[in-house]
Amino acid sequence: MEAALRKKQGLSGTVYKRKRLPAEEGLWVFVLGDTTIFGLFFVVFAYYFSLQPDMYRASQAYLNVNFGVLNTLLLLTSSWFVVIALNAVRSNLREIAGRFTLAAIACGAGFGVVKILEYREKIHADITPMTNDFFMFYFIFTGIHFVHLLVGMGLLIYFWRKTRAEKIESSELPKFESVAVYWHMVDFLWIVLFPLLYLIR
């Protein structure tokens, strides 16, 4: 009966596996919820920007665009390294996966250092979340993103430690994919934050 049905559907002689969504299903619920919350943040920011456009534009002039560009390049590069590492895991190339995961961690650490330098620059200029609404949003948005970055780096370290095991079980692949998806979300959120805070006037 099953063979006849497959023949009727043009599937005779071929074994087809049901496609699955990469990563753990629960992570996608988290990603959807997290990006929705950030989306609401962005809408609120845009609304208050429209109320005081001159003040917001004047405040933007105090942001260091070079820092923002550098951090964008670091995160984009780190996401590329994570893609390579994940593909290496799928091919059971543990050494390559480990190297590129470490490279991604280094890029994430670089982002953190640049962001701390940027915060330091603002504080030395007496710019704090209490300065005005723009900088309140700036510190809140980038601060929440920074926490996401730290969590992501912790997950990447877990990824790296697993690549040092003697064997990577196929059942663990969804965990690696989940780490990659989370890190790409961190990257995506910054790609939206960067133009919103630094460029759009």
Image (cartoon, rainbow, N blue to C red):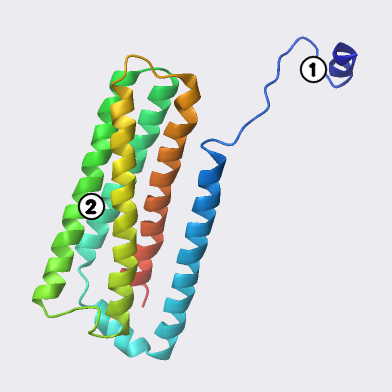
Q: Earlier in the sequence, mark 1 or mark 2?
A: 1
Q: Is residue 117 left or right of residue 111?
A: left
Amino acid carrying mark 2 in the image = Phe
The residue where tag 2 is placed is 111
Q: Which residue is painted at 46% across and 78% down in the image?
A: 44
Name the one closer to the observer, 107 or 151: 151
In the rendered view, would you say 185 is above or below 44? above
Q: Is the residue marked by circle 1 packed among few (<14), some (14-19), or many (20+) residues within 10 Å?
A: few
Q: Quadrant of residue 165?
A: top left
Q: Is residue 32 left or right of residue 93?
A: right
What is the secondary structure assignment of the residue under circle 1? loop
Q: Quadrant of residue 144?
A: bottom left
Q: Quadrant of the N terminus?
A: top right
Q: Position of residue 190 (x, y in %)?
A: 36, 58
Q: Which residue is painted at 33% across and 75% down in the image?
A: 137
Q: Which mark is residue 104?
A: none
Amino acid carrying mark 1 in the image = Leu
Q: Position of residue 189 (x, y in %)?
A: 40, 58
Q: Position of residue 26 (x, y in %)?
A: 54, 44
Q: Quadrant of the C terminus?
A: bottom left
Q: Are marks 1 and 2 in contact (CB under 8 Å)?
A: no
Q: Which mark is residue 11?
A: 1
Q: CA distance from mark 1 to mark 2?
A: 50 Å
Q: Is residue 157 visible?
A: yes
Q: Is residue 191 left or right of residue 106?
A: right
Q: Which residue is painted at 54% across and 55% down in the image?
A: 32
Q: Is the residue marked by circle 2 packed among few (<14), some (14-19), or many (20+) residues within 10 Å?
A: many
Name the one closer to the observer, 118 or 196: 118
